[in-house]
Image (spheres, grey):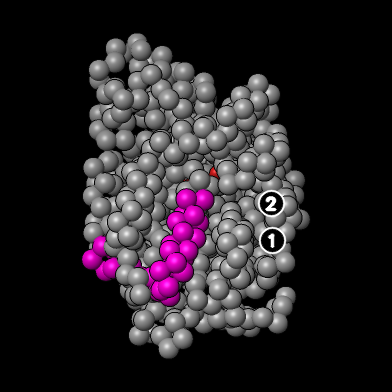
Amino acid sequence: MSEKTTDFDMIIVGAGFAGLYMLHKMRGLGYKAHVVEKGTDVGGTWYWNRYPGARCDIESLDYSYQFDEDLQQEWEWSERYATQPEILKYLRHVADRFDLRKDIDFETTVKAAHFDEGSGKWNIKTDKGDFTARYCVMATGCLSSPNIPDFKGQDSFKGDVYHTGYWPHEGVDFTGKRVGIIGTGSSAIQSIPLIAEQAAHLYVFQRTPNFSVPAHNGQIDAARIANVKSHYKEYRAQNKTRLAGFGEDGKYQEMSIFDVPAEEVQAELDRRWAVGGLQFGGGFADTLFDKKANDIAAEYVRGKIRETVKDPKTAELLCPDSVLGCKRMCVDTNYYDTYNRDNVTLVDVSGSGVQELTEKGLIAAGDEYELDAVVFATGFDAMTGSLNRIDIQGIGGAKLKDKWSEGPKAYLGLMIAGFPNLFTVTGPGSPSVLTNMVPTIEQHVEFIADAIEHLKKAQKTTIDADPEAQDAWVAQVRGIADMTLLPTCNSWYQGANIPGKPRVFMPYLGFPSYIEKCEEVVAKDYEGFKVG
Ligand code: NAP
């Protein structure tokens, strides 16, 4: 432990974007808060995900804190989409600038958090010692528990094995190596072009193709930086009015694609493709709601894939037959073009999957591939994985894992009924992964801090979610998702990537309506919460 004190007002688990701001916020309000972090440094997701090409697919001017005007004015992003090293540098800067490290225990893993009804406090066990705290905040991230499929013969492979979410800090040199990568999600799509440049040969084992749009990354135009910084506050406020918390206002966004003349639809899709990035999917009002409307945008991307990839068979394999956006879209630099290289082979494992790892490589689709290294780009046990890895027990010793055995339930994605004074930042039921995460995190942190201040003023000591309000919220989250095409494919949004995980659509769609709901809850004296 960095200090002898082990009793705090608040213990925060995780030193990523959420944990750092939570600490800063609570300290500013005069609370004794302390962070426990497994890594050797701050950064969270951006500490662990160091694979080649790792960068954020939300623009840097948006994917950054807004809580401090001087910070957002002074920090200079170099590229439209920041690389992992640059985001990590930013978070290290934030930690230093606000002197946060002195209140963080690094290389410390939280094993358990149990609510003690007698003291009204949380007992938090780590591998280095124990803490008590009135409040416990799980700032553990939504995509921080890597999914490592249990392939037959997993340990028999004699070569090197990596997971994109646990990448070695010293980097990996694939020069002259035969590399196999399993998966074609965002992490794979970013790393494949760079691994292909180094490797002697790269085999991509694809179970399901994904839609990817070009990043058109580059240095940010100085005029754009100046413009945003001249009215950053208003710019951020405007983003909060957008469905995903970022984006641009498009001419046709309020219109059905069928109400726009075909040549204008084509021109708009061309324009959005030329701009690049996730905003491609937001051109028309019905893309995410109407399959036929979605087909138009999806077919446009398939056309681009066929135009880019020279081998028609490979191009067809890369064309998803699903709905555009029902799995999170990817943003790439030279992804499809990489399949034109002689040293890259796409292997379709949609039928039998990757069957087995062997001493020399792996067996997929009936053939053995001899490899020097295997990269698991197989994603994460999203939203619930890192919480379920901790033994969390609430009132009466009830285990969170048991409570969530049929799917996670949380009120506003912030609190779980029966677990008083335990908060989750971007928990299930929060807009989290369907938004730009940083403003969502800031909104959650501010909500939590305000709730604690509310308790203090009211001379109360506990806040808990009301089970009925929680059920109603869970139903609302699902109801909204069911109005869209989002639940139509096997996405991690609904736990489908993890064998045995209950299929429940977890994130809430709609940042503006979420903010409105939170404001209404506060205005109605914390409606849906039990304060005592
Ligand atoms: P992911 O999207 O879940 O992709 C995992 C890939 O591994 C999928 O192609 C999946 O195939 C495949 N896979 C999983 N288990 C498999 C198995 N047993 N056999 C064969 N293939 C298997 O994970 P990710 O790429 O790490 O991305 C996760 C999320 O993190 C993203 O959606 C995004 O939200 C975030 N992320 C963001 C960025 C960014 O900002 N640029 C970068 C990376 C990640 P199936 O589709 O068939 O399941």
User: Can you tell me whether the CB of the residue at mark 1 lies under 8 Å from the nearest atom of ligand 1?
Assistant: no
Numbered range of the magenta stretch? 442-470
Instruction: Write the residue at 50% across / 66% down.
Output: 138
Q: Position of residue 295 (x, y in %)?
A: 30, 29
Alpha carbon distance from label 2 to label 1: 8 Å
From the image, which quarter does the C terminus lie in? bottom left
119 in magenta: no
Q: Is residue 19 left or right of residue 52?
A: left
Q: Residues within 10 Å of mark 1 (few under 14, many from 20)?
A: many
Q: Is residue 461 above or below residue 333?
A: below
Nearer to the camera, 42 or 420: 420
Secondary structure beneath disc 1?
loop
Q: Is residue 399 above or below residue 306?
A: below
Q: Is residue 296 left or right of residue 133?
A: left
Give the labeled residue for mark 2: 94
Q: Position of residue 11 (x, y in %)?
A: 56, 71
Q: Amino acid at mark 2?
A: Val
450 in magenta: yes
Decide if residue 175 is in sight here: yes
From the image, which quarter does the N terminus lie in? bottom right
User: Can you tell me whether the CB of the residue at mark 2 lies under 8 Å from the nearest atom of ligand 1?
Assistant: no
Secondary structure beneath disc 2?
helix
Nearer to the camera, 228 or 193: 228
Mark closest to the chain's N terminus, 2 or 1? 2
Instruction: Give the main secondary structure of the magenta stretch.
Output: helix
Decide if residue 369 is in sight here: no
Give the labeled residue for mark 1: 100
Q: Amino acid at mark 1?
A: Leu
Instruction: Write the residue at 23% across / 66% down.
Output: 468
Instruction: Write the residue at 68% across / 28% down.
Output: 219
Q: Is residue 201 left or right of residue 412?
A: right
Q: Position of residue 377 (x, y in %)?
A: 54, 52
